[in-house]
Image (cartoon, grey):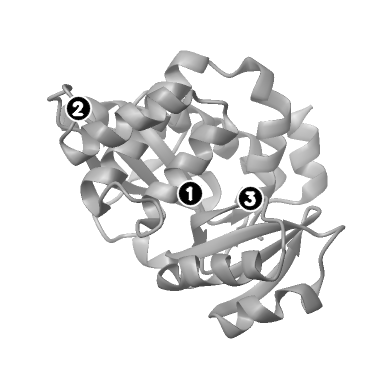
Amino acid sequence: MSGHSKWSSIKHKKGAADAKRGQLFTKLARAITVAAREGGGDPDSNPSLATAIQKARSESMPKANIERAIDRGTGQGADAVIVERIQFEGYGPGGAAVLVEALTDNRNRTSAEVRHAFTRHGGSLGEPGSVAWMFEKKGAIQLDAGKYGDDDVIGAIDAGATDVIEDDGLLVVVCEPSDLTSVREALEADGVEIRSGGLVTEPKNTVEIGESDAGTLLRMLDAIEDQDDVNEVWANFDIDEEVLRTLAD
């Protein structure tokens, strides 16, 4: 997996206890609402919604909050505020490509905040399409690598899985977004316990970032993620694991 994935794992372990619960729940609810509006309120036929709900549950978001967010997206809720999904593309220190997804009710405010986070840390926003082509969306289902191996995912491969990757104690079954439901169902039919699953965005290739740029790049990504309207941030960098651990301490 990419260096960005390693960075995200370290950040999660280090900062989970410090999460701002109210801000987090607001972001999670927005993601659910937009996914429900774009693809319907049934997570079984809407992979984006299933992914958003899974993230909310993993953060212990109350079931009632999840249901209200779905209702807002499908037009059943009382909240009339229109939230839209917008994307920003740019570069960070060391030449890393950065893709940002925001969910906002005020495009101008969000654009100004994201631009400031880039420029303050030596990055720059690019034109639409400047870096998006460097990334691809995939379905990814995570299993416990200590319990399962390649022989346990044969049914998933028959159902459309394209790759199986071992990453940080996990066995990740990769597929095209359109095959996510069928691959999940095949694993469940074979009695495989799924830790998590949904849509992910991964870089097609990575850029090696040296120690001199690593800290500034990670601070820039943190600053972008901390914006209230930012939902997801992806980058195509790779940093040596020892450097990452040093920065996370």
Residue found at x 64% / y 35%: 215
What residue would you read off at disc 1? Answer: 234
Mark-to-mark CA distance, 3 and 1: 9 Å
Residue 158 in the image: x percent, y percent? Answer: 60, 85
Amino acid type at image mark 2: Gly
Quadrant for the N terminus, please. Answer: bottom right
Whether residue 217 is situated above or below residue 237 in the rendered picture: above
Mark-to-mark CA distance, 2 and 3: 35 Å
Amino acid type at image mark 3: Ser
Quadrant for the C terminus, please. Answer: top right
Task: Work out whether mark 2 precedes mark 1 in sequence or the reverse, and give the earlier one.
Answer: 2
Task: Work out whether mark 3 precedes mark 1 in sequence or the reverse, and give the earlier one.
Answer: 3
Residue found at x 78% / y 48%: 241
> Residue 209 vs residue 191: left or right?
left
Mark-to-mark CA distance, 2 and 1: 31 Å
Residue found at x 30% / y 50%: 126
Crowd band around label 1 with a 10 angstrom C-alpha radius: few (<14), some (14–19), many (20+): many
What residue would you read off at disc 2? Answer: 77
Crowd band around label 3 with a 10 angstrom C-alpha radius: few (<14), some (14–19), many (20+): some
> Residue 80 vs residue 154: left or right?
left
Task: Give the quadrant of residue 9.
Answer: top right
Is residue 42 in view from this perspective?
Answer: yes
Query: 60 or 101, which lies in front?
Result: 60
What residue would you read off at disc 3? Answer: 5
Residue 201 in the image: x percent, y percent? Answer: 47, 57
